[in-house]
């Protein structure tokens, strides 16, 4: 028997895994840390799933559609793009991974705004791709020139930005797409809450890809569905590196039903956005500094009678909330995020509980 286990690929040995938000065990938590939808999915989704596990369960012995054809059709219908321009993934994280595997690598850098979604860093490291970070300023601005000059082969623009919450106008993104020579991926995980999107740019610009997820607005984080809207040539490349059956039968059934129920989407997104603006106003009245919020979360700097915003103040507020079983998210490793908390928008009742605790902390 060998004395030790074989060494892994050095790239993998050197990298760290993505750190997902805490999934607390036990009952009674107000979970505002991973930007899930606080409402259950559409009744049409539940009905379609019940049928799939009931009368149609014999189908489980069969592989699902390899390229998620029914989901691609539903996406095509929703956005007015041919299904040949749609690639479906096991969550949009799968799509981001496919993009980096297919377009980045040694000598082919991945670019991102900093701060934004930290998964890009992890995926780039796994492929041995250099990483270039272009700063996002405290006021939500960034330099198209810096991105154009970044040398990145593929650049991820998270729009709305996570975790800071800013949204960038499609016209601004279009100007960037015209200056940037590489593949511009607009990660629209939160676009349904923003009222702004860049889908039209996929039709007008040959280097633009838009990624979407059903985890947030459609309340299906547990079933893992995301998709890319992209030029046909990009879709063909992504299909090459995709797992042959990357979406299981249940996820495909749920996704089709979800994408068809536009009324549910409108009502649910409307409720989340209404709660978001109420909570933002209340936090401001407590003296917290609240960023413009375009996603289903609010980024805010806690401030109390006795404490100015700082890393320690944010940590104190976080622990105060956590002790009351209210879980939010901290990002202590970047100066623009270290002094704040990212608070997912929950139900009205959850947000009342959060606001009561935030008020108690602010008066302390
Ligand atoms: N992009 C961004 C900016 C996100 O915040 C998330 C959720 N963590 C994702 C993509 C991935 O979402 P999912 O894999 O659940 O579709």
Image (cartoon, rainbow, N blue to C red):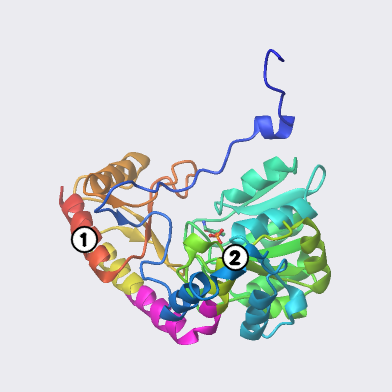
Q: Mark 2 points at which residue?
A: 60
- Disc sitting over residue 211 in the figure: none
Q: Residue at x 40, y 46 (%)?
A: 22
Quarter holding the N terminus? top right
* Nearest to the observer: residue 22 or residue 195: 22
Q: Which residue is drawn at 52% across and 63% down?
A: 223
Q: Is residue 47 left or right of residue 29?
A: right
Q: Is mark 2 on a helix, strand or loop?
A: helix
Q: Mark 1 points at which residue?
A: 353
Residue 259 falls inside the magenta stretch = yes
Q: Is the magenta stretch mostly helix, strand or loop?
A: helix
Q: Can residue 220 be seen in this view?
A: yes
Q: What element carries label 1?
A: helix
Are dots 1 and 2 in contact, CB under 8 Å? no
Ligand 1 placement by image quarter: bottom right
Q: Residue at x 68, y 70 (%)?
A: 68
* Nearest to the observer: residue 60 or residue 159: 60
Residue interval drawn in magenta: 257-274
Residue 161 falls inside the magenta stretch = no
**Residue 174, percent across and down?**
70, 74
Q: Which residue is drawn at 66% across and 30% down?
A: 14
């Amino acid at each position: 028997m060998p004395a030790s286990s074989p060494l892994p690929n050095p790239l993998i040995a050197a990298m760290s895994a993505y750190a997902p938000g805490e999934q607390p065990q036990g009952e009674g938590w107000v979970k505002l840390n991973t930007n899930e939808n606080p409402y259950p999915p559409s009744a049409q989704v539940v009905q379609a799933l019940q049928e799939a596990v009931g009368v149609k369960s014999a189908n489980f012995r069969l592989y699902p559609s390899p390229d998620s054809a029914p989901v691609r059709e539903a996406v095509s219908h929703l956005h007015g793009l041919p299904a040949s321009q749609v690639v479906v993934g096991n969550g949009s994280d799968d799509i981001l991974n496919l993009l980096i595997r297919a377009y980045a690598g040694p000598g082919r850098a991945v670019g991102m705004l900093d701060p934004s979604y930290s998964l890009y860093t992890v995926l780039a490291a796994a492929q041995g791709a250099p990483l270039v970070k272009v700063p996002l300023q405290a006021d939500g601005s960034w330099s198209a020139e810096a991105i154009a000059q970044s040398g990145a082969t593929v650049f991820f623009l998270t729009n709305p930005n996570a975790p800071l919450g800013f949204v960038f106008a499609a016209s601004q993104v279009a100007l960037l797409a015209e200056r940037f020579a590489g593949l511009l991926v607009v990660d629209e995980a939160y676009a349904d809450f923003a009222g702004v999107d860049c889908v039209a740019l996929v039709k007008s610009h040959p280097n633009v890809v838009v990624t979407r997820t059903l985890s947030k607005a459609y309340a299906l984080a547990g079933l893992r569905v995301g998709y890319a809207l992209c030029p046909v040539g990009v879709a063909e490349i992504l299909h090459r590196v995709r797992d042959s059956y990357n979406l299981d039968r249940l996820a495909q059934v749920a996704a089709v039903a979800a994408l068809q129920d536009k009324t549910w989407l409108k009502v649910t997104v409307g409720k989340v956005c209404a709660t978001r603006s109420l909570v933002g106003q209340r936090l401001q009245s407590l003296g917290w500094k609240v960023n413009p919020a375009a996603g289903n979360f609010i980024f805010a700097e806690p401030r109390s009678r006795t404490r100015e915003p700082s890393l320690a103040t944010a940590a104190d507020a976080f622990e105060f909330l956590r002790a009351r079983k209210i879980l939010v998210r901290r990002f202590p490793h970047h100066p623009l995020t270290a002094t704040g908390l990212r608070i997912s928008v929950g139900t009205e009742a959850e947000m009342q509980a959060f606001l009561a605790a935030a008020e108690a902390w602010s008066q302390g």
